[in-house]
Image (tube, rainbow, N blue to C red):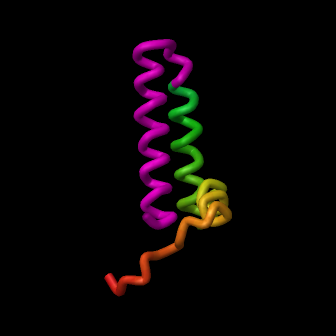
């Protein structure tokens, strides 16, 4: 799995998890959803994401090498 695909999986899991927590535990968990969304927005504008940097340092490959 590449950095981009894993990043999408992690972001999606965080959003779905925080929505579930907001529904079942406390509505203030929606602030975490907003935080993840703001980070996605920021990374779209600046082309830099902290989670991508962390994943690269952990050895996750940038691409599969396929010409797709």
Q: Nearer the viewer, residue 59 or 51?
A: 59
Residue 17 seen in render:
yes
- Outermost residue toward the top in this view: 25
Residue 46 seen in render:
no
Q: Nearer the viewer, residue 23 or 65?
A: 65
Q: Residue 25's x, y, as percent?
A: 48, 13
Q: Nearer the viewer, residue 7 or 48?
A: 7
Give the residue drawn at x 55%, y 18%.
Answer: 28
Quarter of the image where one finds residue 56: bottom right
Image quarter (top left, top right, bottom left or bottom right) of the N terminus: bottom left
Give the residue drawn at x 57%, y 45%.
Answer: 38
Give the residue drawn at x 43%, y 27%.
Answer: 19
Give the residue drawn at x 32%, y 82%.
Answer: 68
- Outermost residue toward the bottom in this view: 67
Establish if 19 lies above or below 42. above
Q: Nearer the viewer, residue 31 or 56?
A: 56
Image side of residue 51 versus residue 2, left or right: right
Q: Indicate yes or no whether the magenta region holds residue 54.
A: no
Q: Please count the marks in the image.
A: 0
Q: Residue 5's x, y, as percent?
A: 43, 61
Which residues make up the magenta segment?
A: 1-29
- Outermost residue toward the front in this view: 59
> Magenta: predominant secondary structure element?
helix
Establish if 31 lies above or below 42. above
Q: Residue 11's x, y, as percent?
A: 48, 46
């Amino acid at each position: 799995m590449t950095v981009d695909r894993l990043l999408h999986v992690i972001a999606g899991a965080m959003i779905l998890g925080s929505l579930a927590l907001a529904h079942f535990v406390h509505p203030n968990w929606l602030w975490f959803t907003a935080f993840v969304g703001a980070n996605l927005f920021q990374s779209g504008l600046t082309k830099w994401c902290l989670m991508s940097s962390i994943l690269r340092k952990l050895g996750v490959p940038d691409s599969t090498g396929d010409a797709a």
